[in-house]
Amino acid sequence: MSPIIHRHISSLRAALQPYRGQQSDRQDSLQRIALVPTMGNLHEGHLELVKIAKQHADIVVVSIFVNPTQFGVGEDFDSYPRTLDEDVAKLATIGADYVFAPSVDAMYPVLPPPTTVLAGAISNQLCGQSRPGHFDGVGIVVSKLFNIMQPDVAIFGQKDYQQLAIIKQLVRDLSYPIEIVGAPIIRADDGLALSSRNQYLTESERQVAPILHRELQDLAEQLKDGGISQQAFESLLADKRTRISEAGFTIDYLEVKTEALDSVVSDSTTFNIENKNIVILVAAWLGRARLLDNQLVVVG
């Protein structure tokens, strides 16, 4: 059955209201509503988020909204692929219940919105450094979606690790009663992380793109045992940046952080990654496509 499409906030709220407080088919529990926020142009990675949502809730709402507030000047807001009919057809095959596909005017009566939701210090690095204001745009749209739908659980992919960390912080700081579930990265057979922007890759670029993940895997392998000096660590990172650049990428960043996105160098300037969970994060351009990836590493 095809999901029911709502384009207006009031109609979606009215559709969801009857489920609240109702008994679930799951034993001794009330019905739960899950939100899967997307910008559309759905691929297998998005569909996996919906499948995970169905494991956590009785009703699944997929939002499809290309959010202007998270695009900077010169970015691809106007050209970002909008494929609502195809997206709804894909969602019908996996049992999504509702699609929320509002217009920009419905979401933002005034644009830019006079109210902001600032992401804070966690956003002033990595993607936030090269895309100033991006995560503030994410903050306002996610806050609006949470308020509109009041879901019990929301599913976000781990491919954008920094975004997931910011959403968790937002929920904690604003006291949203929402469970945030991070879904593992879905990859093509050759290791490339699935992304709507992968379609910007030319045929030859698509052959090169998996190198990014392979270099992350190799770096993770070299770090997992710990026992590396800061000098050797910095040399290893420099070598990886060189290898990725020589493969044809333009690197935005390649960094190693703690799971909380703190520096691996402590306040006392002591370098130590032993017995820590760390994450390797990369963003790099290949032609028109800006590719994101990350690798979690348990050290020691």
Image: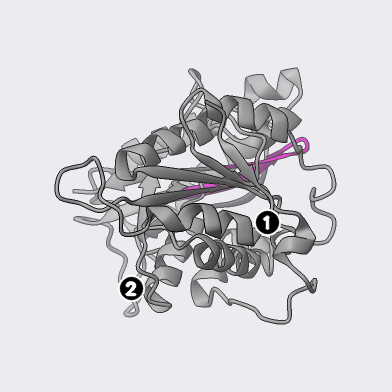
Residue 8's mark?
Answer: 1
Q: Nearer the viewer, residue 74 or 152?
A: 152
Can you say whether 111 is above or below 154 in the image? below
The correct choice, above or below, for 119 with respect to 281 in the image is below
Q: Residue at x 33, y 51 (%)?
A: 32
Membership of 263 in magenta stretch: no
Viewer-side residue, 217 vs 131:
131
Q: Amino acid at mark 2?
A: Ser
Q: Quadrant of residue 203?
A: top right
Q: Residue at x 41, y 49 (%)?
A: 34
Nearer mark to the viewer, of 2 and 1:
1
Q: Is residue 132 left or right of residue 174?
A: right
Q: Position of residue 184 (x, y in %)?
A: 39, 39
Magenta region includes residue 287: yes
Q: Residues within 10 Å of mark 1 (few under 14, many from 20)?
A: some
Residue 266 marker? 2
Q: Position of residue 126 (x, y in %)?
A: 56, 60
- Part of the protein shown in magenta: 281-292
Which label number is shown at residue 130?
none
Regarding residue 286, the answer to whether it shows in the image is: yes
Which residue: 45% across, 71% down? 170
The CA distance from mark 2 to mark 1 is: 48 Å
Circle 1: element type? loop
Looking at the image, residue 129 lies above or below residue 3? below
